């Protein structure tokens, strides 16, 4: 039997970009000590109090089918959180609870695009984006953002590719670049969306990880609430990656059919997970700040180390748990640098190329190991870059 082209072609025929991560994991499985600065996973686990709330809910019997769009209490809590953070009026009719942000991204694109519709996204991008768009039948169209612009997408570049497109997917704070879009960038994006009648799908899963100033949701910009689908998640904000809980925020006339989609696909999120999420949200911003604090601290460590040299360039790191480093001065591609760093120093970072052509010659560093190990690994990376830049012939010898 033949498997559908849609599934077989999900990654676009190329690699899915996770080769180096898999290699590092294989080394760890063989007993080799590797400092893994690869995936976006906290070095702390879900808070014990959240787990206790989860266990209590399960013991109390919330283990049957749960409300598909989310329990009324959880939807209300999410609506209140969103309204408090954005000042945009938000009720339960604007909220659909999803099994994580990833499922939310997929569903949001089904809402925005018919099969064959072009769907815009920004390069560099979170590695699953093109596949998620293809899975829904849309045709992914990359809009380049440039290192020299600190990876802030330009409105002209979006507009130049917008003909026929139905949606634009953005992500701020951004994975992989660690960049937070400026108010000017967001205003330009909103203008193109209004002029080109695009849905804006705004991936805000890192909204609690903003290192200076506050998160701005483009849904709050003039004329945007009716055309924006915000994807949120508790994976990053509450270290609940394995619980698979997130949401879509949007106009009621989009949320209602998305609920129908959920009925026919996921059938919602387990009730005990929803209850744990409700408990976690009730802990307020203090818990979110505690979860984000290690990344803020490590970003400060990195800025200090990187300021003392001029071989590796840090892209302005405004948020999320990542740093994007420009290593083009070494003469190596991101992939060659990352492979050599792993082979020689047992440090795993993601090649920029895993996140699109625009991040070539860069590295994504996840700040996901404890402070001292992080500082030591970053210093080794810097020293290795200096060595490569000074002596190109020995660069990749391991
Ligand atoms: N969006 C971005 C930018 C991400 O980095 C991730 C996960 O790393 C997700 C969405 C998906 O998150 P989850 O499905 O765990 O909520």
Image: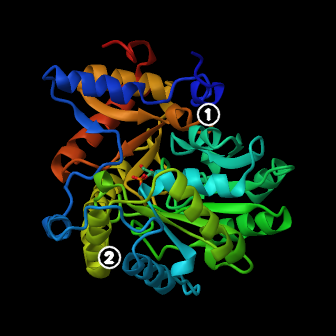
Q: CA distance from mark 1 to mark 2?
A: 38 Å
Give whichever of 276, 17 is nearer the camera.
276
The secondary structure type at the circle numbered 2 is: helix
Q: Residue at x 19, y 55 (%)?
A: 44
Residue 289, visible in the rendered structure: no
Determine which residue is flagged by label 1. 357
Q: Are marks 1 and 2 in contact (CB under 8 Å)?
A: no
Q: Residue at x 36, y 65 (%)?
A: 66
Q: Position of 293 compared to 325: left or right?
A: left
Dividing the picture into quarters, in which one does residue 220 lie?
bottom right
Q: Position of 297 compared to 161: left or right?
A: left
Relative to 56, is 143 above or below?
above
Which disc, if any, is residue 281?
2
Residue 360, visible in the rendered structure: yes
The secondary structure type at the circle numbered 1 is: helix
Relative to 226, is 48 above or below?
above
């Amino acid at each position: 039997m033949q498997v559908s082209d849609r599934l077989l072609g999900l990654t676009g025929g190329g690699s899915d970009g996770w080769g180096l991560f898999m290699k590092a994991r294989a080394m760890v499985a063989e007993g080799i000590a590797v400092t893994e600065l690869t995936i976006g996973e906290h070095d702390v686990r879900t808070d014990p109090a959240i787990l206790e709330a989860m266990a209590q809910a399960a013991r109390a019997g919330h283990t049957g089918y749960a409300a598909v769009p989310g329990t009324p209490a959880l939807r209300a809590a999410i609506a209140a959180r969103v309204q408090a953070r954005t000042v945009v009026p938000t009720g339960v009719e604007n909220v659909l609870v999803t099994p994580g942000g990833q499922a939310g991204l997929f569903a949001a694109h089904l809402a925005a695009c018919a099969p064959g519709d072009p769907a815009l996204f920004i390069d560099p991008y979170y590695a699953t984006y093109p596949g998620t768009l293809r899975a829904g039948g849309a045709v992914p169209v990359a809009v380049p953002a440039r290192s020299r612009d600190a990876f802030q997408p330009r409105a002209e570049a979006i507009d130049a590719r917008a003909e026929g497109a139905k949606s634009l997917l953005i992500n701020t704070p951004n994975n992989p670049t660690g960049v937070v879009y400026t108010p000017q960038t967001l205003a330009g994006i909103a203008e193109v969306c209004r002029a080109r009648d695009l849905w804006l799908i705004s991936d805000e899963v890192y909204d609690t990880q903003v290192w200076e100033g506050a998160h701005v949701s483009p849904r709050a910009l003039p004329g945007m609430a009716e055309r924006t689908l915000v994807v949120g998640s508790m994976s990053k904000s509450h270290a609940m990656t394995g619980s698979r809980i997130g949401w879509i925020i949007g106009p009621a006339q989009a949320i209602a059919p998305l609920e129908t989609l959920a009925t026919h696909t996921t059938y919602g999120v387990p009730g005990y997970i929803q209850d744990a999420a409700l408990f976690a949200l009730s802990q307020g911003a203090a818990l979110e700040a505690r979860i984000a604090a290690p990344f803020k601290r490590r970003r400060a460590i990195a800025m200090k180390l990187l300021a003392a040299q001029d071989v590796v360039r840090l892209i302005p790191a405004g948020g999320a748990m990542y740093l994007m480093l420009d290593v083009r001065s070494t003469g190596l591609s991101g992939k060659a640098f990352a492979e050599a760093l792993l082979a020689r120093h047992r440090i795993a970072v993601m090649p920029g190329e895993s996140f699109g052509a625009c991040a070539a010659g860069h590295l994504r560093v996840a700040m996901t190991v404890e402070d001292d190990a992080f500082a030591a690994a970053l210093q080794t990376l810097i020293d290795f870059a200096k060595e490569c830049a000074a002596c190109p012939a020995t660069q990749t010898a391991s």
